[in-house]
Structures are given as structure tokens and as C-alpha cells.
Amino acid sequence: MRLFYVNPHNVLDYRNDIWALLVHCNNDFIPALSERDRSSGAWLSPTDVTNLPKEYFASLLENHFIFAEVRNKIVGFTCFKNRFTIDGLDSLGETNYVSTTCVYDAFRGNGVATALYKFLEVDIPDDIKLAWITRRTWSTNLNQIHLFDKLGYSLLLQLDNHRGEGINTVYYGKKLL
Ligand SMILES: CC(C)(COP(=O)(O)OP(=O)(O)OC[C@H]1O[C@@H](n2cnc3c(N)ncnc32)[C@H](O)[C@@H]1OP(=O)(O)O)[C@@H](O)C(=O)NCCC(=O)NCCS
């Protein structure tokens, strides 16, 4: 597996790979990606999976990306916003905030996401490294939360029932420096 970083200026070169992964993973997310306007914003009413909201996709393409490639095929990515401040966690200052991670089903459970997250901690360009990596997910995304625990993230903030009855939005962070 090859891992590599792409800055926002060059992300458009990978838009088809990103789109294909988003469509594949759409319904794994709560709410589905096709029901969102932005990865960090308000939820919209459902739309066709093949027609992910343009604003959501456009805002995603402003991120920094790390790709995982196997035999010349992109099998997963994680992406993040550099210098992002989170409402309610302002005391952390500017953080590298992970927006979205997707891995093709057939490649899951093989350490692809783990490798992407370790790359984010160590191998991104020095000039965009920051003390904190932050991210959020939903409380029933157990594989993801298991990974956060394993990689040394702490639960920083919880928004109860934010994604429906009994489904909380949970913010995690890891201090690197
Ligand atoms: C969450 C996601 C990114 C994890 O990717 P991955 O490459 O499967 O992750 P890893 O293989 O590094 O780790 C998966 C962990 O989940 C568990 N797991 C085991 N089998 C698994 C499988 N078939 N599928 C998924 N997870 C599995 C394992 O416990 C593993 O932890 P371990 O290393 O201690 O055994 C991936 O499942 C995905 O794309 N999900 C859909 C989108 C999503 O939820 N994104 C994150 C939103 S915040």
C-alpha cells in the first residue's frame, strides 16, 4: 500500500476517485452524506446518492487529503482542514480537523484507516503540522471510535442526540506536540 499527501491546490486531480469513494460510503454515514450540505454543517433533506450535494462536495475539495493506493487504485482517503477552530473547543486553538474518511468495503479491516491516521500524525508537511488533531463522529460508529481509542485520542465534547434519538455527535482529539 502506498500513502501520499495532496494539498488543496492539487486535489481536483483526484476528484473522480474521491467522488467514487463518497458514493460507495454514502450510507455508512449518519446522516448519509447525501443528506448534508457541508461536512461540518447543517443536515439537508435526503437527495439521490448519485447526486451528492454540490456544496458538500465543493467544500470537501478544499481540504488537504491523504490517499491510500493499492495496485494503482485509490482504496481510501482521509481529509482534513488545516488551522480549524471548533466551536466549544476554542481553547485548543487552531487544529488539524479531520473532515471525512472513506475506505472501500473490500479493503476494510486491513489497517488502511489506521495507516492514514498515522500518516496524518507524522508524515504531512512540517509547515502544516499543528499541536492538535481533532475530529468528530457519531456515537454508534464503533469501528471508528475503537480506532480513536487505539491511536490515543480522547473524547473532548459530546452533543447529545445531535444525529437522532440516542445518536450523539462526539468530538475526539489528540495532542501531538
Ligand atoms: C471507519 C473506516 C474508515 C475504518 O477503515 P478501515 O480501513 O477498515 O480501518 P482499520 O482496518 O484501520 O481498522 C478497523 C478497526 O475496525 C475493526 N474491524 C475489523 N474488521 C472490520 C471490517 N471488516 N470492517 C471494518 N472494521 C473492521 C477492527 O477492530 C479494526 O481495529 P483493530 O486494528 O484493532 O483490529 C471504514 O470502515 C469506513 O470507510 N467506514 C465508512 C465511512 C466512515 O464511517 N467514516 C468515518 C466517519 S467519521
Image (cartoon, rainbow, N blue to C red):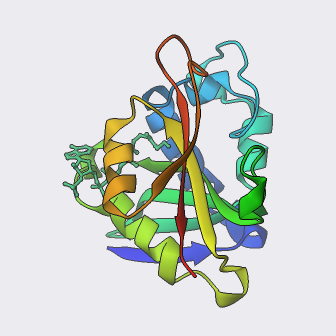
- In the image: residue 24, left or right of residue 147: right
Q: Residue at x 26, y 46 (%)?
A: 106
Q: Residue at x 38, y 59 (%)?
A: 113
Q: Is residue 139 above or below residue 100?
A: above
User: x, y (%) of residue 73?
Assistant: 40, 63
Q: Nearer the viewer, residue 107 or 64?
A: 64
Q: Nearer the viewer, residue 16 or 174?
A: 174
Q: Is residue 28 above or below residue 116?
A: above
Q: Residue at x 31, y 59 (%)?
A: 150
Image quadrant containing the N terminus: bottom left
- In the image: residue 109, left or right of residue 98: left
Report how many numbered discs are placed on residues in the image: 0
User: x, y (%) of residue 75?
Assistant: 39, 57
Q: Residue at x 46, y 75 (%)?
A: 119
Considering every residue shown, the one lying at the far bottom of the view is 126
Question: Does residue 128 appear in this view?
Answer: yes
Question: Does residue 104 appear in this view?
Answer: no
Question: Residue 110's quadrant in the figure?
Answer: bottom left
- In the image: residue 22, left or right of residue 142: right
- In the image: residue 155, left or right of residue 133: left
Considering every residue shown, the one lying at the far front of the view is 91
Question: Residue 40's quadrant in the figure?
Answer: top right
Q: Is residue 171 above or below residue 46?
A: below
User: x, y (%) of residue 68?
Assistant: 42, 66
User: x, y (%) of residue 104?
Assistant: 36, 47
Question: Residue 3's quadrant in the figure?
Answer: bottom left
Image quadrant containing the C terminus: bottom right
Q: Nearer the viewer, residue 89 or 39?
A: 89
